[in-house]
Image (spheres, helix red, strand yellow):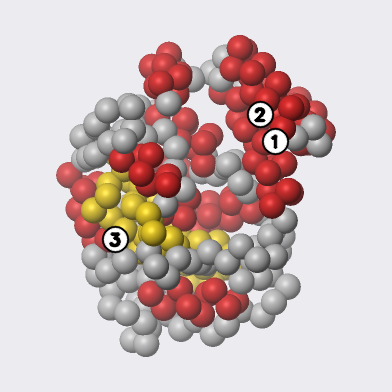
Amino acid sequence: MSLDTNQLSVETDDVTVVVATRNRADRLRETMPRHRARTILVDNASDQELPALPGVDVVRLDANRGAAARNVGVERARTRYVAFADDDSYWTPGSLARAADIMDAHPRVALLAARVLVGPEGRLDPVSAEMAASPLGRGTAGPSILGFLACSVIVRRDAFLAAGGFEPRLFVYGEEALLAMDLAAAGYELSYAPELTVRHLPQPAGRDNGARARRETRNRVLTAVLRRPLPVIGRTLLTAVRRSPRSVFGVTRDLPWALNHRRPLPPEVEAALRRL
């Protein structure tokens, strides 16, 4: 499906933009017209009516799947590469086409993370600065990374699907870590590409920061159980108990599942994580 002529021009046919949303109609009106590729919007069972979005492929889910809603969009896409955006972010002109060129030139790269500029003033996200100074050295396409912000990456579609995408059990907050580990374990490179830029326009008002912190802590522990050595699991769990005792209840409930799906990382990936 081509984009409506009311939207900005398509700069590449090699990339599909996937956006997951829930009850953020106001943000969609601002960001969706800025995407310069075929766009799939996956609606996480919003209670609000979606705005009119000409030319956008809209998928309405009957339940909120959190970050795993992006998996639905990737499965629906037919391009080699898929760029993720949140309902409050968008890729700047030229970035999608440039990302496709980089991935064409580097077939072992499964994920590129863009530079993120936050707010109307465009301040550099601290995560981007950390990626630029990654202690993991440089891969074939840029500084090597083992983490990312989901609203600002482009992935190789077949590698993403083979890795299982975003784990539904983690829902939201910190879901990126497990996927990064699994892509690296499969032998792919993950790189930071500062020549690519994403604008992020968050509106923090109304968010329950306490609930977010508890879920991030829970997901950090579960991810450790799923992939990390026992000493790392112990340290992660101890930190969780100290910082957020309530989050441990969520871990306890999902611990049998995590143990059943445990798959330790290859030594070289574990060693890289220890350097971070």
Badge 3: residue crowd in 10 Å (few <14, some 14–19, many ≥20): many
Of badges 3 and 1, nearer the viewer stands 1
Residues at discs 2 and 1 in contact (Cβ within 8 Å): yes
Q: Is residue 177 left or right of residue 133?
A: right
Q: Earlier in the sequence, mark 3 or mark 1?
A: 3
Residue at (62, 33) in percent of width and height: 220
Residue with the most extreme left position: 105
**Place of residue 59 in the rendered image (x, y in percent of width and height, measured from the top left):** 57, 68
Q: Does the rendering let one see residue 38?
A: no
Q: Which residue is mark 3?
A: 96
Residue at (38, 39) in percent of width and height: 130
Q: Nearer the viewer, residue 273 or 156?
A: 273
Residue at (66, 30) in percent of width and height: 222
The image's mark for residue 218 is: 1
Q: Earlier in the sequence, mark 3 or mark 2?
A: 3
Residue at (27, 61) in percent of width and height: 95
Q: Nearer the viewer, residue 44 or 174?
A: 174
Q: Is residue 106 left or right of residue 266?
A: left
**Place of residue 129 in the rendered image (x, y in percent of width and height, measured from the top left):** 36, 44
Element under disc 2: helix
Q: Which residue is mark 2?
A: 221
Task: Tell me the CA gap for discs 3 and 2.
Answer: 34 Å
Q: How many marks?
A: 3
Residue with the most extreme bottom position: 6
**Place of residue 122 in the rendered image (x, y in percent of width and height, measured from the top left):** 37, 64
Element under disc 3: helix
Amino acid type, residue under disc 1 in the picture: Arg
Amino acid type, residue under disc 2 in the picture: Val
Element under disc 1: helix
Q: Nearer the viewer, residue 123 or 117?
A: 123
